[in-house]
Image (cartoon, grey):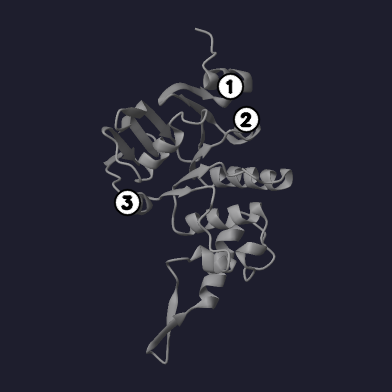
């Protein structure tokens, strides 16, 4: 059995700029792979290739051991690849369960004729998915704007899981969060790993990386320069790869 996701020899150019240069990467089910590197290293471009935002000039992708072509974000979603960006794409004026079903609302017919939103169904289903990953939100009728940063992350992740995500790409999930909220999000990442979800975690925070990652992949100037098991490296070594100061 191979990787859940594997990309091979990916090349992405923007005019004369090679943003991703011959990068290969694999993620197992139930594994957290941290993708790290300085600004401009190519991390964001690589995940946009994986999630269907950008088409690569060269390279291939396999998902669950099968060659796939991901030409759009909808192609990625259909495979079970979900990307959670820093802005979370939540509607702040809607409540928790409405956000989990955002764009895919459940309806029922009144008198067999008129479709209306089935609030009871969406509330029950949202509670089930939150309970499954041990997330506590006082009321699913609370509007998103009233929730903490950690709770908002939990809603975005729960939405992905409800719609059968198999691989989550998480872009700086603890950015702009307080210490307690950061801990809540990192605990959630560990819960997802225990549920067999593959995770690509993009982070600049070494504490976060070394708390949850199984492997750490370092990019610099569009290339992969290291792929290390967490237990076999240190924060100092990873930083040395990021800045280009590793021993030759």
> What secondary structure is found at the residue carrying circle 1?
helix
In this rendering, position of residue 10 left or right of residue 166: left
Picture disc at residue 35: none
Q: Quickly name the residue at label 1.
A: 239
Residue 143, x across and y down, in percent: 62, 67
Q: Quickly name the residue at label 3.
A: 75
Residue at the location (54% across, 13% down)?
A: 245
> What secondary structure is found at the residue carrying circle 3?
helix
Residue 25, x across and y down, in percent: 40, 30
Q: Earlier in the sequence, mark 1 or mark 3?
A: 3
If the image is split into quadrants, where does the N terminus sit? top left
Q: Quadrant of residue 152?
A: bottom right
Residue neighbourhood size for the residue with mark 2, other residues' Cα within 10 Å, grouped as few (<14), some (14–19), many (≥20):
some
Which of the pair 116/136 is nearer the observer?
A: 116
Instruction: Give how far apart the Cα atoms at labels 3 and 2 are.
Output: 32 Å
Residue at the location (59% across, 18% down)?
A: 237
Q: Residue furthest right?
A: 180
Above or below residue 142? Residue 32 is: above
Q: Earlier in the sequence, mark 1 or mark 2?
A: 2
Q: Contact (CB < 8 A) between labels 1 and 2? A: yes
Above or below residue 35? Residue 173 is: below
Q: Quickly name the residue at label 2.
A: 206
Res. 155 visible in picture? yes
Res. 232 visible in picture? no
């Amino acid at each position: 059995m191979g990787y859940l996701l594997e990309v091979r020899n990916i090349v992405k150019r923007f005019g004369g700029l090679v943003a991703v240069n011959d990068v290969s990467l694999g993620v197992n089910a139930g594994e957290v792979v941290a993708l790290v590197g300085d600004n401009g290293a190519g991390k964001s471009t690589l995940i946009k290739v994986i999630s269907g935002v950008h088409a690569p000039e060269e390279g291939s992708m396999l998902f669950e051991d099968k060659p796939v072509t991901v030409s759009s974000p909808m192609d990625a979603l259909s495979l079970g690849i979900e990307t959670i960006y820093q802005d979370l794409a939540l509607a702040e004026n809607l409540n928790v369960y409405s956000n989990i079903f955002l764009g895919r609302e459940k309806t029922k017919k009144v008198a067999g004729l008129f479709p209306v939103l089935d609030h009871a169904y969406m509330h029950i289903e949202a509670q089930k998915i939150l309970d499954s990953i041990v997330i506590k939100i006082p009321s699913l009728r609370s509007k998103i704007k009233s929730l903490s940063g950690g709770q908002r992350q939990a809603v975005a992740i729960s939405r992905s899981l409800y719609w059968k995500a198999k691989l989550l790409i998480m872009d700086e999930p603890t950015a702009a969060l307080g210490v307690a909220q950061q801990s809540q999000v990192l605990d959630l990442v560990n819960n997802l790993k225990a549920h067999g979800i593959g995770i690509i975690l993009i982070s600049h925070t070494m504490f976060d990386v070394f708390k949850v990652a199984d492997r750490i992949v370092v990019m610099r100037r569009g290339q992969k320069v290291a792929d290390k098991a967490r237990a076999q490296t240190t924060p100092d070594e990873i930083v040395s790869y990021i800045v280009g100061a590793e021993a030759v």
